[in-house]
Image: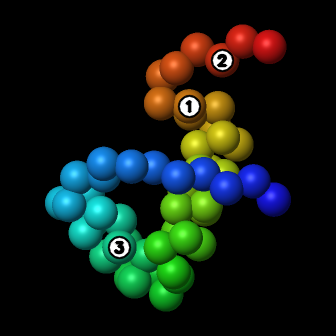
Amino acid sequence: MATIEIRDVPEDLYELLAAGAALCGMTLQEYLLALLETAAADGGYGGVAVTG
């Protein structure tokens, strides 16, 4: 399995994500993985054009 590291996350964003994870009864890692899976399944990619 691959590892992703994100640096320089603003403290307020970190706290928001950590609170979301806690509300869902998940670890932050589980919560972030679920968010990434949802974004990828929806073709979200944050508006970034993805080409093959």
Q: Is residue 9 left or right of residue 50?
A: left
Read off the residue under disc 1. 45
Count of labels shown?
3
- Res 50 label: 2
Residue nearest the observer in this picture, 28 or 46: 28
**Nearest to N terminus: mark 1 or mark 2:** 1
Where does the C terminus fall, quadrant-wise? top right
Question: Are dots 1 and 2 in contact, CB under 8 Å?
Answer: yes
Residue positioned 29% across, 63% down in the render = 14
Q: Which dot marks residue 16?
A: none
Give left or right: position of 40 versus 31: right
Q: Position of residue 50 (x, y in %)?
A: 66, 17
Mark 3 vs mark 1: which is more N-terminal?
Answer: 3
What amino acid type should be assigned to the residue bearing mark 3?
Ala
Work out which quarter of the rendered image holds the N terminus and state it: bottom right
Q: Residue at x 47, y 30 (%)?
A: 46
Residue at 60% x, 51% y is 4
Q: Is residue 50 left or right of residue 45?
A: right
Q: Is residue 26 above or below residue 9?
A: below
Task: Tell me the crowding category of disc 2: few under 14, some 14 to 19, or many 20 or more residues within 10 angstroms, Cα based.
Answer: few
Residue 17 in the image, given as x and y percentages of width and height: 35, 65
Query: What residue is shown with label 3?
Result: 18
How far is the residue under mark 2 from the one under mark 3? 29 Å
